[in-house]
Image (cartoon, helix red, strand yellow):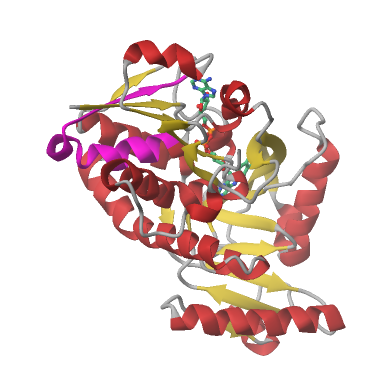
Amino acid sequence: MSKIVIVGCGVVGAAIAYELSLVSSLENLDITVLEAQSQVGQVSTKAALGVLMGACGGSKTKNEALSTLRLASLLRFESLVPELEAKTGIKIPYNCHGILLLFQDLEDADQLETAAKWQELISDRGSQGFYMKWLEPDLLRSQYPHLQATAAVHSFADRSIHPSCLMQALVKGAELNGVKFICDRPVHNLSELDQLEADWIIVTAGLGSRALMQPELKKDILTSVGGQAIKAYLPDLNLKNVIYGDDTNIIPIGQDQYWIGATVEFKRLTLPRNENIDLLMQTAIKFCPAFAQAQILSTWAGDRPRPRTQGAPILGYVPNRPNTLIATGHYRNGILMAPVTAQVIKDLILEGKCDLPWQKQQLKS
Ligand SMILES: Cc1cc2nc3c(=O)[nH]c(=O)nc-3n(C[C@H](O)[C@H](O)[C@H](O)COP(=O)(O)OP(=O)(O)OC[C@H]3O[C@@H](n4cnc5c(N)ncnc54)[C@H](O)[C@@H]3O)c2cc1C
């Protein structure tokens, strides 16, 4: 019997617990998840919008390894969602209409350059089996008369998912497979876990991982980046796709309601900040003028765990602790990357290696 202790239960800890639970009988695994709060999934994961920019999100980075991980995660969602729904009976809202990325003012030289870059990505993704299409102004106007943009990219393979429903289903699925979840159980330092005699410890404590790593590495590995979002009501728009423009998403969630977000706030200020909520709304109106009539139902804020000295996420072995793994710092893509993170951690535990290109994400000591 191999004893595995997972520290922290947001989407990353839950996805790892579920993935490992699928082989727990076969591999004789005893898995326990320790969560500091009275309920799982109440920190970063609770604030997330669930946009899964796996195919189109790679436009800003030439990091091939990261793109491969994102695409692998996106693919895993296609089987994970029906698998979890069938196992747990929990309905997980999963939008398969793709993401529509909107551009305004394309006559700018800068914007033309952007358009050329997108054409390159569209061709790359096409050859990888992820269909994306460039929509010229005429086509855009005729297909989406309620939107305002000079051009767009439709990324058909990208998705959005309801993070809290996903979270619930991962936990229930893992529980049904024998994983134990213990809430109100903060871990103050890793040596405290020695008495549990675990074969593997996996740190998935989000921003709480900073404190857990400091005695090990004597440095702060994470910073938090705030984000605010809006839930709005707008009847009769019938938007199906996720809309993305100026770094803001509009996500249809059914019953004429939409999530709009999220801001990216590096300065440590107490959120919410009303001026940024106004900015979000203005961006939504800029790309879809009908939002001028929308009613704001609620707003919320949360913090994202972002690595301080390396690219997101942090994934792999904790230096000087051969049986401790860490999976955190997923920054703006923790929901997207939870499934592939779980795959990498599972492979490292069971095989001692993983064929996915996770190495660049290792924690630097
Ligand atoms: C406004 C906003 C919008 C976002 N939108 C998206 C999006 O559209 N798509 C996307 O992919 N990502 C999005 N994200 C990012 C995403 O939410 C995060 O990357 C992801 O939730 C991180 O998950 P996690 O499990 O690592 O951390 P968390 O969800 O923070 O979970 C960590 C858990 O560990 C627990 N913990 C902490 N310390 C300890 C300890 N010492 N002992 C025991 N337990 C501990 C915490 O209580 C918590 O439950 C968004 C984030 C924000 C804030």
Ligand 1 placement by image quarter: top right
* Residue drawn 45% across the image and 69% down it: 157
Where does the magenta region start and end?
Answer: 13-35
Give the mark count: 0
Between residues 55 and 234, which one lies in front from this camera angle?
55
x and y, in percent, of residue 235 in the image: 59, 54
State yes or no: residue 338 in magenta: no
* Residue drawn 66% across the image and 48% down it: 310
x and y, in percent, of residue 49 in the image: 57, 46
Whether residue 142 appears in this view of the structure is no
* Residue drawn 52% across the image and 49% down it: 50
x and y, in percent, of residue 282 in the image: 80, 55
Q: Is residue 178 left or right of residue 208?
A: left
Q: Is residue 57 shown above or below 195?
A: below
Image quadrant assignment for residue 229: top right
Q: Is residue 100 shown above or below 134?
A: above
Whether residue 94 appears in this view of the structure is yes
Q: Is residue 355 shown above or below 124?
A: above
Q: Is residue 307 left or right of residue 350?
A: right
Image quadrant assignment for residue 119: bottom right
